[in-house]
Structures are given as structure tokens and as C-alpha cells.
Image (cartoon, rainbow, N blue to C red):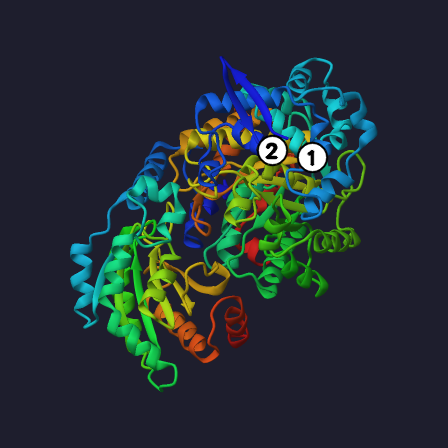
Amino acid sequence: MSESVDRNRLRAYTNARVALRSAGMSLATSELLDMALCLAEARDAVHTQLSTVTLVPQLASSGLEVFSVRSAAGGRGEYLRRPDLGRRLSAESRAALEGACEPTQGQNRALSGAPRPGRLAVVVADGLSAVAVERHAVPVLDVLLPMLADWRVGPVVVAEQARVAIGDEIGEVLGAVATLLLIGERPGLSSPDSLGAYITWAPRVRRSDAERNCVSNVRPEGLGYDRAARKIAGYLNRAQRLQLTGVALKEESALLED
Amino acid sequence: MPYRHTIRGISYAFEDLRTLLAKASPPRSGDDLACISAASAAERVAAQMALADLPLAEFLSRAVIPYEEDEVTRLILDSHDCAAFAPLASFTVGEFRDWLLGEEASGDLLSGLAGAFTPEMVAAVSKLMRIQDLVLVARKVRVVTRFRTTVGLPGTLCSRLQPNHPTDDPTGIAASILDGLLLGAGDAVIGINPVSDNVATVTTLLRMVDRIRERYEIPTQSCVLAHITTQLTALERGAPVDLLFQSIGGTEKTNTSFGVNLALLDEAYEAGLDLRRGAICADGTVGQNVMYFETGQGSALSANAHHGVDQQTCEARAYAVARRYQPMLVNTVVGFIGPEYLYDGKQILRAGLEDHFCGKLLGLPMGCDVCYTTHAEANDDDLDTLMTLLGVAGVNYIMGVPGADDVMLNYQSTSFHDIAYLRSALGLRPAPEFEAWLERGVRRQLSMQGLLNA
């Protein structure tokens, strides 16, 4: 039958799960078990703890100062139920970060009239996939950092049990003019390790998501490191010029791409 | 005025109507997150008992969100059909439940009363219902809509073919469309969620689906689910728009967060009707339902726009927005929002059936995106349970995603195989126009080459 022949070829055109083998009208055993494995990997990615022991030295090797912080969410269960806690630093982490960066804040106050470039705080957050962060954060930064000549980059803050908005508080405490946050995205069956990058100008607690820009699906099978880094650098450099991020910057970017 | 109920000498007080509704809600993580849920299991039942004694008419005299502050409240109260409500005016919420379950409340009668019900009334009564009640009452009500196919007829189950692709690649999307058509999916709509919300993408994809539909004479309709303003611009520039889509919520502020309001939706509805792209359907009438809405419990809280109203009542209020436009399709995307709103399979199951029940009573052609995300405590067994119960409850349509794995939106929905399962297990058939097309055997002529060169 022509249709079955054609169905088998469909996989060449998309990574969607087309042309699955059937048993009767249901899924064949091998397909069922393949899906079960993908779900298991995605579920494991959600519940795996970020290996800061490995990640922190890797990040430090690029010469940047690295801090480790935790959100206000106690554990994974609380993290999943209480997104508000994942958006804020724990009291302990906030105090530690404030203590660590007092000289920085002084410099930044002096910055208002000075020609020094603005500070870009980099946050590496576990989000919903520690696996994504462990695999892709360092390779992306390796490509990206040389593109950021107009920025004073650092420190890098590794945040556990963290959601996107934690970058606002971290950036605020560090006195940064912008935050770049790399975070593990919600794993899908076909992408347990997708990394997201969020760029926020003038990070402050209670910024809305409409005030940031996002580069999504960063991983070799999705948006590769080079293209992702160029997109991120493009957003950052336009943000620096326009002194903003969010919907207005996105519209400008769309015009540029046209 | 506080509402009260006393159980064995312990008096429970609920300071206003929204508090009573929230405390009476079966447990879900979103209401916990909003800090409005019952503090104990006993308090929840006390609230349900107080709610059962509440006159239905109370919902007409007390708004959960002030009339002056919210255009959805104004829509609900201004469009209420008082004459149709008169025979129900003496009911309490508990008596309303009993009446709904009785023989007198036939499907035809309930359909005629849709305008008498407000979202708050149906949300309230659903909080006193078990799963089997939600199934049994919803099953009585058929809401039939038409564009090029007829969706919602008794004995049918339709499907949205959802061929999403992570880069909007037309070839990849065509491959998923082909797979879905071969497996009998796509009679509710071929509906694509684009990655890029721009006019060029919307137009490219609409043109492709339209050419495929015309070449193979497929009785169905298409939709690219960009923001409604993007779709309107595409429409003005001549893109072949069938259904106009928008995500909506149950409060004005939620809709503001989606970038829409009633005036904009009114404009879109008029523009859609003016196109007259519907066809003569199986019963000889021309399809004139042109809108498609998606909703989901938790969107109001997520937008910080819930006014202290529980997420299920907010969801039912979204249906008041939807029914203003006699939509072709409405579905809750029940497990998409994540575990902070619906924690696990049990909460998703109940929410899906509540949404279907409330939508049907309010006169909507309810479908359901039966789905979950990988960070919720759910798996495919939970989806099987919900889709089967919805099938029994007479859901108009479910989604068809290749392998149930949406590689663009990264969540698990229902698959082409699931649609085939449900039709087989419950003896349900596709939409009549689509079924006739399947029987004509045109499917055997489909090929990638054919679709791409259509």
C-alpha cells in the first residue's frame, strides 16, 4: 500500500514522532517502550540535582568570579509547587551575595557619570533541567564571552532551585545594568536538555516577563551553540544601545531581521 | 455578608462569595499557591455544605469581581437571560445539582437554558459534583458547530490535527499533517502553533494548508494560532484565514495580559464572519462558526489577575467570553500550565472534566487538550483515563499530535493513535463530512510530494 511506504519515509522531514508502528490501531510495543524511556529521561532531568561541584570549577576556569546561591525554595517538591519561592534568593544567599559584592556596588555608583562599560551579571540556573545546564552552559559561554567586548562581564552566579526571575534579584544585588540568565527549560520527550537564555536590562525584583528577551531551545539538536551565542550577543548589544529589553527590543530585532 | 456553616458545634465562616467558592473547591495546587483554598478537609466540606444551601439567584446579586472593575463581569451580568432563569430562580446550588442529575433536565432543555446559567452558577454546582456527575450531566448536552465539518454530533469524536514544528518548517509540518490524515485525524481543524508570531509565518502556513485542503478536497478548516492581531493583519493582506484563534481568560486583567479585550475580539469576529469561507455541511446548512478559543485553569493566577477568585471559577468565566462569539471550537489545555496549578494526574483529571462540564452547560462546543508536562506528577495512564472519561462525557474533540509528543511546545498531549483508540473503544465516528472523505479513499493518493506541490 502506497500509504505505508510513504509513512515510513516521513521521519526524514521532521523530528516529530510521525510514522510510529502500530499494533492494531494502538502503538506497537517497541514504540511504547521508546516513549517510556523518553519520559523517564525527561522526568529524571526534572528531578536531578545540579552538580555544582563539577560546574563551578568549569565556569571559574574562564577567569570569571563564581558564586553559588540557592533560591528560597527548600527542595524540589516545594520548588515545583511554589514558583514564587524559586524567583527569590534565600535569605542566606542574599546576605552572602551582598557581602561578596560590596566593592562592586561602590564602583557601580561611581559608574553613573563614568565611561566604564556596564556590568553584565551572568546567572546559571538549574530551572527544570539541571542536565541542560550541565551540558550546555559552559559551551555557550565559551562562544559567547568573546563577543561581549563592550561589557564588563561577571561575576557568574550559579543558582539552585531557581526560576527565571531570580536573575532580577541577583542583578539588583550585584548592581548590574543587565542580567544574562541561562536556565534549564522544561524537558520535553524529545528534548530533556534544552537550555534557555533570558536577557533583562536593569534587573530589579518584580520585573515582568514582558521586560525581558528570550533565546530558547539551545542545544546541539536545536539552536546550536554558535547561533545561540550570536542571538544572545545581538540582544545584549542592542539592549545596551537602546537601554531596554523586552517587547520593544523584540520588535526592533524583528525589523532588523526583515 | 459572611456565609456560615456549623458542623458539630464548630462554626465555619466565609467572608464573601469568592471565599466560599474557593474554600468549596476540590483540592488543587493553584488555589493553594494563591492562599485561598480550604485550610482543612473539614473546612472544605463545610464550605460545600454552605454552598449547597446558597440560592442560585445569589450569583446575580453578588459579583465575585466587581461589575465596575471588570468587563467580563459586565458581560456575564448584562447578557444574562432572566426569563430563561425564572424557572430555576428558587433553586439552591444543591437543589440545582439534584435537578441536573434528574430525568427532567434533558439535553434539549439544558441546551435551551445555557443563557440562564452564569459561569459562577455552573462552577459552584460542579464543586458539589463527583466525577461521575460531571460525566453524566455533560453527556446530555450536545453543542454542534459547523464550518466545513460538523463537530459535536452525538456518536462522533473529532480531532484537531496539531502538526507543530520547532522551527515552523513547512516541510516538517506537512509530514505531520500527512501522518495525521493517514490515521484519520484532522476533522475539527488543522491547527498549527507557530514559533514565530509574525504575519509572514502565519500567511505561509495558512497558504500551505489551504492548498493541501483544496487539492485533496479535504473537508476541514485550518488555523494558525498566533496572536489574534497577527492573524487579523494576515487576513487583511489576503491570507486564507478559516478560523480565528485566541487564548482567553476569565477576568479583564487576564485578557489584558494576553493582549486582548472584548472590543478586539468583537472586531475579529466580524472580520471572520465577513470572509464567508464556511461550506455547506452535511445537514445542508452553511458553516458560520468562525472562532477558536483556548483556555485553562490557572491562567488568571499566572497573570496575577485572579482577584482572589479560585482558578476553576475564573476558568468558567472565560467561557462567558467565548460564548459571545458562537465559536466553532473551544478547548481547555488542561495540564499544560504546570504542577503549580494542577499538581498531578488526579487534579488534571478532575479539572478536565470540570471544564468540559461547565463549558457544555454554558453552551460551548467543548473539546479538550488532554495533556501534561514532564514536571507534573502525571503520565500516559493519566491521559488515557481522562480521554476515556471525556469520550464517555461526549467531548467534541481532542488533539492529535504525532506520538503525543509536541516537539515545539514540549508537552505531552494525545496522539493520532489515541483518537483511533477512543473511537474504537466507544464506538465513535469522525465528523460526517470527514468520514465521507475517508471512505472515498482519497487518503491513498496522499504523498509528501503531493502535499508540498499542492
Chain of the residue under label 1: B
| 1 or 2: tag closer to the N-terminus | 2
The residue shown at (16%, 57%) is: A54
Which residue is pictured at 59% across the width and 56% down the height? B226
Query: Which residue position holds label 1?
Result: B62
- Label 1 and label 2: CA atoms lie apart by 9 Å
Most foreground residue, B141 or B129: B129
Q: Which residue is drawn at 32% across and 54% down?
A: A89
| Between B402 and B318, the one nearer to me in the picture | B318
Q: Where is residue B48 in the image (x, y as percent from the top left)?
A: 56, 22
Q: Which amino acid does label 2 sit on?
A: Asp
Q: Residues within 10 Å of mark 2 (few under 14, many from 20)?
A: few
Chain containing mark 2: B
Q: Mark 2 points at which residue?
A: B16
Task: Indicate the amino acid at tag 1.
Answer: Arg
Tell me residue B416's x, y (percent).
50, 38
Task: Check the image and report above or below for A54 versus A187.
Answer: below
Residue B384 placement (x, y as % from top left): 46, 29
Element on which disc 1 rests: loop
Q: Is residue B17 visible?
A: yes
User: Image point 57% across, 29% down: which residue?
Assistant: B20
Q: Position of residue B239 (x, y in %)?
A: 68, 61
